[in-house]
Image (tube, rainbow, N blue to C red):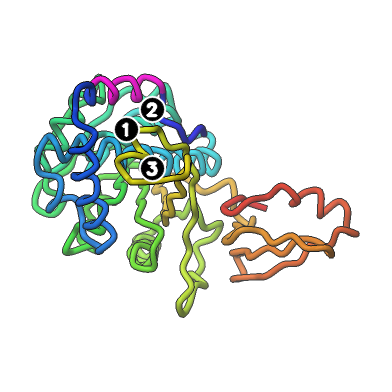
Amino acid sequence: MDPALPPRLKEAAEALLEGVSRKDLAAHSTAISKEYRAGGGSARVVRSEADTLAYLVARLPATYAVNAAVLAEVRAAVPDFTPAHLLDVGAGPGTAAWAARETWPALAQATLTDSNASFLDLARKLVPNAEFLPRNLITEALPAADLVIASFVIAEIAEPSSAVSKLYAATTDVLVLIEPGTPQGFARIHAARAQLIAQGANVLAPCTHANACPMTGTDWCHFTQRLPRSRDHMQAKGASVPYEDERYSYLAVSKARRSANEARARILAPPRESKPGIELKLCTPAGLENRSIAKRDKQAFVAVRRAEWSDLV
């Protein structure tokens, strides 16, 4: 999917930013980025309209691009899945809801929950035809839905295993979890994967199997999404290049479906091309594998020469 913001979302965001001081946006954006880099969450730094507008510029483009990429993988894994009701938990400004509607245009019902009133106020302005519920993931009930998404949420929960259980209980079909592509973010995804498999979930992506995760030591499973930066985005983040690379870890599981990608392999790092051929780091049902594809093996080489990090082979 296109990592750029959909035109209607971009227009709605630009309308909210009209007349707002870019200097103030940059100051609030710096505070938000500093908190995230320190491993914190939005609760302490997104507390006012000015904070949410800074988030709109600094974080919305990247989180949308990541959600769009992840949901495209879900669609490829279960092409017959056509969700009717989305539950976006910890919705922020409604990023996942937009990505879900772009992925499945027939998606009829969207329920967005967040314990942050400032975020919900912003989401009401950005996401049309949706229900908005102030909800605490740990202490309050969640409505059921056939597609449940918790995007960049688990990091902010003191009891991650309880949160994952509650999210899975609200899921009637597909659950998607997305976290930052850091060792800590992957650790949360790794723990959730083991927990959900123990509860009977079918793994859809990125894994092509439900065997024990082969990642050990200091290695971690993550991917990257490149997205264009607007002028406001560059100014807010003090950036000098016109693109951003957002790293993320994720997991998609289903109660009702099995993946169409079972028995395939996922590329876990940028392919390395050399004179003899291409080197691929793969996660396979048998474990991690470093595979060399020689140029002289023309059929195999042509099949993977344009493969990228995160692709299936």
Within 10 Å of disc 2 (Cα), the crowding (few <14, some 14-19, many 20+) is some
Residue indicated by mark 3: 62
Q: Nearer the viewer, residue 18 or 48?
A: 18
Q: Is residue 13 magenta?
A: yes
**Which of the two residues, 237 or 41, is positioned nearer the viewer here?**
237
| Residue at 35% from the left image edge and 37% from the top image edge | 233
Residue 187 lies, in percent from the top left, at 36, 68
Magenta residues, start to end: 7-15
Left or right for 143, reference 312:
left
Q: Amino acid at mark 3?
A: Ala
* Mark 2 in CB contact with mark 1 (< 8 angstroms): yes
Residue picked out by circle 1: 97
**Furthest residue to the bottom?**
217
Between 305 and 105, the residue placed more toward the observer is 305
Of label 3 and label 1, which has the lower sequence position?
Answer: 3
Instruction: Point out residue 148 in the picture as x, y percentages from the top left corner.
Output: 31, 42
The residue lying at 34 percent from left, 24 percent from top is 9
Quarter location, residue 189: bottom left
Residue ID for mark 2: 101
